[in-house]
Image: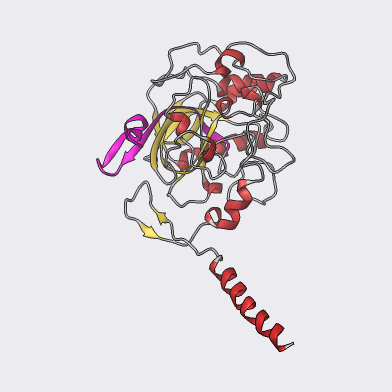
Amino acid sequence: MKRALLLVVPSLIALTFLISSCTPSSTTPSNTSALSAPTTQSSPTPEETPERMASKAGTHCGDSPPANPKNCKLNIDQPFNVGCNLPFSGGQSHDIDLHCPNEGCATRESDKAQNRIKNNLCATGTPVQISVTSIDKLQAAVDQLVQQGKISYGDTGPPQPADRAKLQGLSTVDVNGHAVTLGEGKLVTLDAFVLDAKHDDTYVLGSGPVGFKGEGVNCNDSLFDWNDIHVALGQTASAQECSSVTGEIIPHFRPAVWDRVDSNACTSPHVTNPLPVKGLRVRITGQLFFDGSHKPAPCNAPSGGHDPERRAVWEIHPVYAIQVFDTAKNKFVTLEEWAQGK
């Protein structure tokens, strides 16, 4: 009996040491503001804790591409029509450009209209520099229209085609707080930090029996080349995603270097040579778009809904240009220039 006890005690000590050595240590990410350059140390935000990262990663991160990625029930095999010169250089034709039209895999007229706007690469004019306050005021303006019974969105689906005109000519402010009139289809530029970037709606994401099955605008195909790159943009590098503004890089004619914009723990391992974009200060230019299929899910909202975490459903979608703040050169450069050698 004594011999058995002597064997057990060292084993318990070794097990205790092993468990304690595996306990994850806390990290202190930097917190950098787009309006102030100094870097300070702060505690991890909820999005950065290992537990939340693991829960957000899901159960399909290591899955292989599905044998049958197409989930559109319509008999759709039509090319995408740009309708203008591409607003960016380096555009490449992909499989989706040959087989998925501008309205995607939609049957309702409201979805068709919204999808065509999501895929609009032809907005023109001088971009207006905006801030998160600009986005907040645009969101408040639409919600006032909802209260007045003039428009609906979210659970009822996107606004009806005729109602989308009400999303134009709304009062807001520019980055300097000056009153401006903006709306869907206008070009804007946002100076912000990348909180996360991922090939969204793909087969590796989701927590159900199988991964996501793509998005209607992209003909419900779950492969990476057929889906948007969702970029969550924050006022600081350590902001919570629930306070973010969304930028969407659509798959149509996506440049090769843009396809590398992915910092997500689940999706980036499936991307060839992903760029280290998390925490980068960027300038995103593109079309203002109102995602009427969802409601906002800001930081003070009740949890448990199906809406993605963000302060508003106004987005920069599609993205037309990406600049990165190069700390060595102390200026903004194109993503293409910044990515050289990376």
Q: Is residue 63 left or right of residue 43?
A: right
Near-viewer residue (331 or 55)? 55
Residue 316 percent coordinates (x, y) = 49, 31
- Of all residues shown, which one is farthest toward the front? 3
Q: Is residue 280 left or right of residue 99?
A: left
Colour scheme of the rendered structure: secondary structure
Q: Looking at the image, can residue 66 be seen?
A: yes
Residue depicted at 45% across the width and 37% down the height: 274
Q: Is residue 150 left or right of residue 318?
A: right
- Of all residues shown, which one is farthest toward the bottom? 2
Which image quarter: residue 291?
top right
332 magenta-colored? yes
Residue 11 percent coordinates (x, y) = 63, 76
Residue range highlighted in magenta: 313-342
The C terminus, quarter of image: top left
The N terminus, quarter of image: bottom right
Number of numbered discs on residues: 0
Residue depicted at 68% across the width and 23% down the height: 70
Residue 254 percent coordinates (x, y) = 48, 23
Near-viewer residue (207 or 330)? 207
Residue depicted at 71% across the width and 83% down the height: 4
Compared to residue 211, the image places residue 5 above or below, namely below
Residue 309 percent coordinates (x, y) = 59, 44
Q: Looking at the image, can residue 178 be seen?
A: no
Compared to residue 230, the image places residue 103 above or below, namely above
87 magenta-colored? no
- Of all residues shown, which one is farthest toward the left? 329
Near-viewer residue (206 or 236)? 206
Q: Is residue 47 left or right of residue 333?
A: right
